[in-house]
Amino acid sequence: MFYDHNVAHTVLERYKNDLNLDIVVLPELVYCDECKTLVSTKTCPHGQHHHIKYHAQTLKTLLLAGILPPAILMRRDISAMILSELFPNRFENIQKLCDDLFPSNGLLEKQTEREFYENLMKLYQTTSLT
Ligand SMILES: [Zn+2]
């Protein structure tokens, strides 16, 4: 993206006419710890010091270290899929972990590592005691 005469342009404009597209450039989205949600930097009244920006490289660093990125920055099903592929068979007994950590419907259910990460993120997002 670049500006020319105070008008925002993107490289996508090259394809605009060829593909008959309408291109709308949105302002940057960030997580605001005052608004408690994703906001546009144009509409949020709070300063930059309240904003968490999306840094792809930082999320990649967390994932490569085996850590679930915050759900405000990456959907839990996506981070669960990536971690389960990056670290297959990471746990000696994933079934015990799941049985000990997560509620069950009483039936013995075999959990995949992907489901483990998704359920773990649900626990991280539980806020009644925080
Ligand atoms: Zn805000």
Image: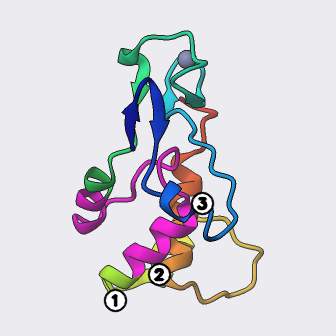
Quadrant observed for ligand 1 in the rendered image: top right
Residue 65 among magenta residues = yes
Instruction: Please say if the residues under marks 1 and 2 sit with CB atoms less than 8 Å apart.
Output: yes
Residue 92 image position (x, y, % from top left) = 32, 86
What segment is highlighted magenta in the picture? 60-84
Taking the spot 35% from the left edge, 16% from the top edge, the residue there is 49
Image quadrant where one finds the N terminus:
top left
Residue 39 in view (yes/no): yes
Which x, y percent locates residue 51? 42, 25
Report how far apart the C-alphas of labels 1 and 3 lie in the structure: 46 Å
Q: Earlier in the sequence, mark 1 or mark 3?
A: 3
Q: Which residue is mark 3?
A: 16
Q: Amino acid at mark 2?
A: Glu
Q: Mark 2: few, some, or many residues within 10 Å (few <14, many ≥20)?
A: many
Q: Mark on residue 113?
A: 2
**Which amino acid, mark 3?**
Lys
Residue 105 lies left or right of residue 50; in this view the side is right
Q: Label 1 amino acid?
A: Asn
Nearer to us: label 1 or label 3:
3
- Residue assigned mark 1: 89
